[in-house]
Image (cartoon, rainbow, N blue to C red):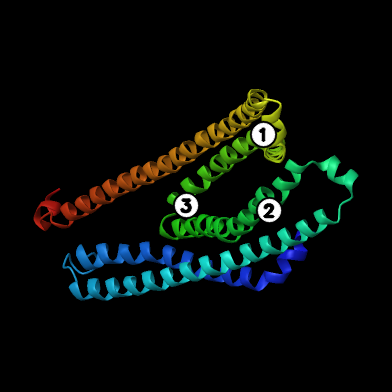
Amino acid sequence: MMWRYVRRYLLYAILAAMFMVGEVLMDLVQPGLMRQIVDQGVLGLGHGGTGDLGLVWHLGARMILLVLFGGFCGSMNNAFVHMSGQNIGNEMRKDCFRNIMAFSFPQLDRFGTGSLVTRVTNDITQVQAFVSQFVRGMIRTALLTFGSMYCMFRLNGTFGLIVLCAFPFIVGCLAFCLSKANPLFGKLQAQLDAVNAILQEDISGIRVIKAYVRESYEKLRFGKANEGLVKTQLRVLVIFAFMNPTVNGLMYLVVTLILAVGSWGQEALQRRLALSWRRSHIPRSCSMGF
């Protein structure tokens, strides 16, 4: 059913995904260039400790060009993402309204006005946002995750293993939070339908409500429905509020472990270099005497 709408604007989605690949590749290439600037251009590793200002200018100009190209890819990705998402939402909204207008009176009574209003407005907006988020967010996240792992393994196998070991914990945290929040979404949808239905009834029958002095009752009825909706929304937001710092904490822990392992390796390398230097500077006569 959904594919019928997606395939009409599939070209926009494919172009958005291609530009997203370009943007992510530019993000993954830049740390390697920065490493060359620091190691070779500033510290002069491999050049006897002498920095190379020309290399710094050359790689810096290349990084600027990559940033500009990445920004262009990001802008084009946003344009095509919104073109696909908005057009899909537009087609779904028109078909949904056309079907509602063809409903019989028993069907309208069975679904209810509030539920139908929610279907046309909020539900289609959520589907539209999901399409945009999938084309942009999920593709970007997947490319950055696996691309970063590949770059880590190329840089150092130990760094790559640290990231790979942390990956199941991050995915597990996301799965746990989503499993807790998923049952609440159905309840949230029903409560939103109830709020919309009460609001629609009150607006349609405002003259009757005022004539029979039922304002207090309607305020109480709307307040109860709105309070239930707010409580459910808060529960969902609390779950996601727990998810974000947990995932960030795991990521910072990974960065800390990488820095710690890197510092230990650097200290071991310095000790080996110092030992080899002392051995190479031992006078030959002393070594022969021993």
Amino acid type for the residue under numbered disc 1: Leu
Amino acid type for the residue under numbered disc 2: Ile
Q: Quadrant of the N terminus?
A: bottom right
Above or below for 156 versus 80: above
**Residue 151 coordinates in the image, percent (x, y):** 45, 60
Residue annotated with mark 2: 124
Identify the mark nearer the N-term, 3 or 1: 3
Query: 10 Å neighbourhood of mark 2: few (<14), some, or many (≥20)?
Result: some
Left or right: 96, with 242 as reference point: right
Which label belongs to residue 160?
Answer: 3
Query: Contact (CB < 8 A) between labels 3 and 2?
Result: no
Secondary structure beneath disc 1?
helix
Between disc 3 and disc 2, the foreground one is 2
**Residue 265 coordinates in the image, percent (x, y):** 32, 48
Which label belongs to residue 184?
Answer: 1
Say which quarter of the image contains residue 110: top right
Left or right: 21, with 118 as reference point: left
Amino acid type for the residue under numbered disc 3: Gly
Secondary structure beneath disc 2?
helix
Above or below for 168 versus 62: above
In the foreground, 30 or 36: 30
In the foreground, 245 or 112: 112
